[in-house]
Amino acid sequence: VHRIPIILVLLTFSTVLPLFYCKGAGVEPDAGSIPDNASGYYDDVARLLAGLPLSEGSELSALTRSPGYAAHQEAMQGFWRTVEHQHLRIIQPWQKRHMSAANPGQTALYLLSGADFLNLYSFFPDSRRYVLVALEESGRLPDPSAVSTNETLRSLEAIRAVTGNIGARNYFMSASMNRYLNGDFAYRGTTPVILIFAVRLGFKIHTVEPVVILDNGTLRTARADEQPDGSRIQMYQPDDRRLREIVYLQMRLSDENVSTQTDSGRYLHSLGRVNVMLKSAVYLLHMRQYTGVRDFVLKQADFIIQDDSGVPYSFFQNDDWEVRLFGTYTAPVRLSGTGYFPQPQMAADYNSKAQPIEFQYGYGTLRPDGASNLLLARRVKH
């Protein structure tokens, strides 16, 4: 089953950072706002997790002096070299050639994402807001100084086990995520992994906060006594200090949860026109019980990138969409516990129209020959 999102789950600590609270939290990204975060605390927490040098005089510096942390730094450097060589070096130029039609001003929405901010950013690098939706808890971020060295090193080892999948195969393994990211670790849930990707991609982290969705579909910082619905990260690039944000929501994908009758659905509809990413989506949108989710995607999206497990190909066979095919497709992957959904017309069109791709996407890693398929759909008529 799907590797639906990923990492930070609640743990009780003697000292926990007050709900990711910090100055500026709880506001939408403002194109003109310049972060005021003199301490750089959240950026240092993210860099600590990512194995990157901390800011000069950081209050977390003492945590980096153990031999175990040095091993984590070395492993994360190797992980990122693999990502750059096998992923970014190939996907970034491909994205510039083939995805210029995606509106950079729109929110990038990734359903069934896990903690995979890496791919969402790689394909939509200019978005101001990124929204990831998955099953895993986002969790709360502990104060690193309140976590023992042994617990920190155990957590970092678990994080490496998960990020290694994306580095080697551009794919999050569900079993690995569940074991290591929802297990009994100090740093759990999706937030730590998302932070690692963000700082490794060059972002400075301004704030991190747990959030709840209100009845009207807006987000608010979660109180200490509330179970968060997700997390929100505000960040910026050093050469462009306008705030951007990542919102991760723990949500079971269902027709009800994307409808305007629910708080989560009202939030998703409030995003307006979106760019959508679907990858290793367990063929959910092929199933009758998810027609509402499929219709939501087709109604709200202006641009879609997906593999064959996303929206069925037949829904793009009209004048509303311009479709381009990449890679190889003959039949769906057989997954345990799901149906089997062949698409013969798509197989024929891939055979005659598809362009090659040089990277793995979606379930390509599960196919014997590693062959991936990728579909780009651009709305041409509203």
Image (tube, rainbow, N blue to C red):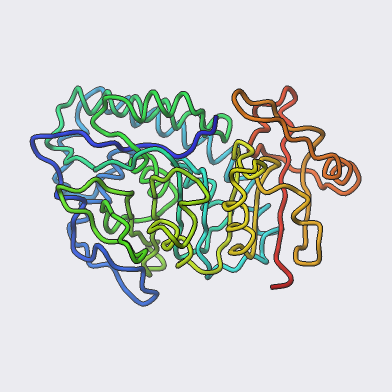
Q: Residue at x 32, y 74 (%)?
A: 33
In the rendered image, residue 138, in percent from the top left (x then y), is placed at 33, 42
- Can you say which quadrant of the picture contains the N terminus? top right
In the depicted structure, whether residue 49 falls above or below residue 206: above
Q: Residue furthest left?
A: 14
Label count reads 0
The front one of 14 and 70 is 14
In the depicted structure, whether residue 305 falls above or below residue 70: below
The front one of 138 and 47 is 138
The front one of 102 and 138 is 138
In the rendered image, residue 79, in percent from the top left (x then y), is placed at 46, 32
Is 32 displayed left or right of 258 in the figure?
Answer: left
Is 176 displayed left or right of 70 in the figure?
Answer: right
Is 194 displayed left or right of 345 in the figure?
Answer: left
In the rendered image, residue 255, in percent from the top left (x then y), is placed at 53, 50
In the rendered image, residue 104, in percent from the top left (x then y), is placed at 56, 67
Q: Residue furthest bottom?
A: 32
- Can you say which quadrant of the picture contains the C terminus? bottom right
Q: Residue at x 62, y 57 (%)?
A: 295
Q: Residue at x 51, y 33 (%)?
A: 172
